[in-house]
Amino acid sequence: MTLTNKPHWKCRPFLKQIDENAFEIYLGNTTVILSELETKDLCLCIDEVCQQYKNSIIEFENNLETWKFELVSLANFRGIKILSVKNELWNLMYKFACEFDYIKGKSEWHLFHQEDISIRISRGIRDHVFIVPQASNSWTLRHNSEINIIYFINEVHLQSLETGKLNSWKQDIGPRGTWTAKYTQQWLLKKYIPKVIDYYSQKSELLAAELLSLITNYKSQRPDIQEINNLNDLVSYLRDIQSWLHLYVDNIAATLFRSYYTAFTDLVRNTDSAINGMDYIMGNLHSIDWQKTPDNMTSKLIDSKNWNFKIALDGLEKQVARINICQYENSYNADLITRTFIWIIENGKISFSQSQLNAAKQALLPLWEQSRFEMRHVYPNR
């Protein structure tokens, strides 16, 4: 949930206002009744703890470059899926690691150590990283099954850095120290897998091209928000936000949406009036209005034959005006408005300036980062 929300905004799922100066608080199996002042103090304490915890998670993901990869849960730990290969290629990777264990030689490739089913990439006393196989469907590793390669940093390794000469584990990050997820992925693709392919293609009838084809789902990443120049590239980020809003059942501080509503309304301002789907656009905008004035539903349906994009733009501008005087926003409203922006960008012919696009990207970034964090760490199983 977003932090720093006032108790009476109905943004916090663990509390419920029961009268003007009293709140019912649900924390685990404990339920208490607190005054408004006591509730505010409690919220401040929770926000302080949660903010520190959130900052630590963000710092960890930033430093180890894990944000762009899928977070997965295994039996005893959580890791990062950085690559997928066919079982046949993984077996060769594992075989090579066993053959080039660091205790068996001193060449540049003797840097591995076998740890059960995982591969430990080491520099002797300390590790660079662990990579662990995960079958995509089950642990029955059939010949043609797909193996997810999971990036994993051993907690004992991080603790050993903290107790050594370093002030922080962050000081050890780099090619000669602890590897990031991005570096590990690139090292596998550009160095390790080509070396394994070259080594075993010389010893068997396997062709290098056949082995390369066993890398099953290495896809180029979408451009970062700051790098986007094509409007359609914004859509995948808007969909991320919409998915988060669809899950979110509480109110959210309006400050998170003000620049977003404003910038995207301005971005789509000059949309060709011939855009398809005006019924969908107006249906979304009217759904927001109907929550407040249901008596107007019939009259608005009668006017549907006269819908055009100018009316839709007027509706969006009214939402901009509304959000600027609200303290909090209903997640359903934000969901509908985001769906509307997605539809316009995907189906409309839009004339826009560089400054309008830049403003939209700037406004989108903090909202998307909030949605990314919560979908990854607050609602990971939904």
Image (spheres, grey):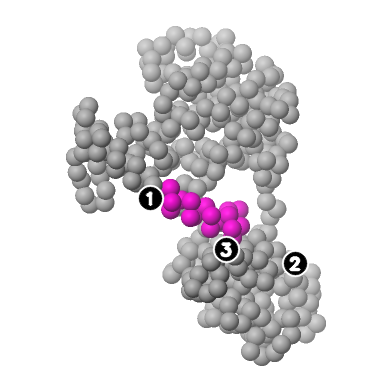
The quadrant in which residue 11 appears is: top left
Q: Locate the N terminus and report the quarter of the image it occupies.
A: top left
Q: Is residue 171 placed above or below 23 in the rendered structure?
A: below
Residue kind at label 1, given as amino acid type: Val
Mark 2 / mark 3, whichever is N-terminal? 3
**Dot 3: within a 10 Å radius of its alpha carbon, few (fewer than 14), some, or many (20 or more) residues?**
some
Q: Image point 48% across, 30% down: which residue?
A: 255
Q: Position of residue 63 (x, y in %)?
A: 59, 58
Nearest the viewer among 304 and 365 is 365
Select label 2 or label 3 by which is in front: 3
Residues at marks 2 and 1, CA–CA distance in whole angstroms: 42 Å
Nearest the viewer among 291 and 255 is 255
Secondary structure beneath dot 2 equals helix
Q: Which residues are magenta?
A: 51-68
Asked whether the viewer can see residue 319, the reply is no
Residue indicated by mark 3:
170
**Dot 2: within a 10 Å radius of its alpha carbon, few (fewer than 14), some, or many (20 or more) residues?**
few
Residue kind at label 3, given as amino acid type: Lys
Q: Is residue 266 placed above or below 83 in the rendered structure?
A: above
Residue indicated by mark 1:
49
Is residue 370 left or right of 249 when viewed as pictured?
A: right
**Dot 1: within a 10 Å radius of its alpha carbon, few (fewer than 14), some, or many (20 or more) residues?**
few
Residue indicated by mark 2:
190
Q: Position of residue 335 (x, y in %)?
A: 49, 32
Q: Position of residue 187 (x, y in %)?
A: 70, 67
Q: Image point 54% across, 81% down: which residue?
A: 115
Mark 3 / mark 1, whichever is N-terminal? 1
Secondary structure beneath dot 1 equals helix
Residue kind at label 2, given as amino acid type: Lys
Residues at marks 3 and 1, CA–CA distance in whole angstroms: 22 Å
Mark 2 / mark 1, whichever is N-terminal? 1
Is residue 74 left or right of 118 when viewed as pictured?
A: left
